[in-house]
Amino acid sequence: MRFPQDLLNAIRKAKNVIVLTGAGVSAESGIPTFRDAQTGLWAQYDPVELATPEAFAKNPKLVWEWYTWRRELASRANPNPGHIALAKMENLWSQFLLITQNTDGLHQKAGSQKVLELHGNIQRTKCFREGRRVKSWNEDQIPPRCQQCGSYLRPDVVWFNESLPNDLLQQAFDSSSVADLFFSIGTSSIVQPAASLPLVALQNGAMGVEINPTQTPLTQTMTYSFQGPAGVVLPNLLEQAIHK
Ligand code: BV8
């Protein structure tokens, strides 16, 4: 596939590039996305229903076990060519930031360092009440309890109906508003406030590029939208842009 020349030129001339990724970037690493059917035991559950404080309050054991399954899946997963291309991208321009909705830690595993985890990271665990990070716990307790205050431990992620950390959100919007090139990769562009970031970039004059196998609410708005897997399209695009 030959990419449009003005996109290749824009990639070469860009000064400030922002990438927003979603669960689709980890799909080729074997991690089910939020909207794909989950596998096995978890197929009967809707992730959006489970990733809430209400679900945890109602059935802490079920939600804790779901995260244990996901944590183990993420620990075993390897970055795919999409993650690796993104890690290579971070030193191509004078300003770069990878904003991810993902909580699996695969961008960092691929070598990305300029990463902003909007929704937290399932490899981190914290006390529900104190918010303090906890690195070990009694594995026989499900879910385990904080040894300081007795409250449940929980994954250090932002659940639906929980607010995102203000500082991270502000940084994400500020960076998006000054980007001259904004990539939205592997996200259904449904979850707010992350889904507003590309719109802020476009409103401030950025060129928008979407990579996703399917159309999303963003597709019609972006300058370019390429339908295909991130692990194929992104390395191919970078190859054409960098090796003239
Ligand atoms: C908040 C952590 C204030 C947990 C996650 C305004 C309008 C409408 C709704 C709202 C709104 N404001 C707030 C809401 C409510 C809610 C929301 O957005 N709901 C949605 C369902 C409509 N938002 C919130 O609650 C946020 N909080 O706004 O605070 C507040 C406070 C109190 C009360 C109310 C509001 C918090 C949102 C954060 C939720 N936590 N994750 C965990 O991980 O367990 S979000 C979760 O969804 C994941 O992080 C995931 O990454 C993220 C987004 O989904 P996607 O990444 O897009 O994944 P998805 O499966 O949807 O799509 C995958 C895509 O990949 C698909 O398009 C597919 O085609 C594509 N794909 C597949 N294969 C590939 C591929 N792409 C590329 N390559 C491939 N190979």
Image (cartoon, rainbow, N blue to C red):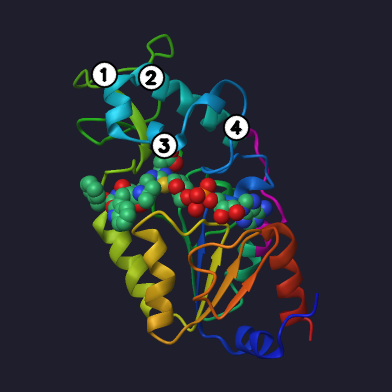
Depicted 217 relative to depicted 145: above or below: below
The location of residue 182, given as percent across then percent down, is 51, 75
Q: Which mark is residue 124?
A: 3
Instruction: Estimate the spatial distance between the alpha carbons at disc 2 and disc 3, rounded to whole Å.
Output: 12 Å
Please tell me whether mark 4 or mark 2 is closer to you in this view.
4
Instruction: Estimate the spatial distance between the alpha carbons at disc 2 and disc 1, rounded to whole Å.
Output: 8 Å
Q: Residue at x 55, y 81 (%)?
A: 223
User: Circle 2 — which element?
Assistant: loop
Q: Which mark is residue 73?
A: 4
Q: Tell me the kind of residue under disc 4.
A: Leu
Quadrant the N terminus occupies: bottom right
Quadrant the C terminus occupies: bottom right
Give the residue number, with chain letter if any, for mark 2: 137
Q: Are marks 3 and 1 in contact (CB under 8 Å)?
A: no
Instruction: Estimate the spatial distance between the alpha carbons at disc 4 and disc 2, rounded to whole Å.
Output: 20 Å
Q: Residues within 10 Å of mark 2 (few under 14, many from 20)?
A: some
Please tell me whether mark 3 or mark 1 is closer to you in this view.
3
Q: Residues within 10 Å of mark 4 (few under 14, many from 20)?
A: some
Q: Would residue 83 be seen by someone viewing this image from the given angle?
A: no
Q: Residues within 10 Å of mark 1 (few under 14, many from 20)?
A: few
Q: Tell me the kind of residue under disc 2.
A: Trp
Give the residue number, with chain letter if any, for mark 1: 147
Q: Are marks 2 and 1 in contact (CB under 8 Å)?
A: yes
Q: Is residue 222 left or right of residue 135?
A: right
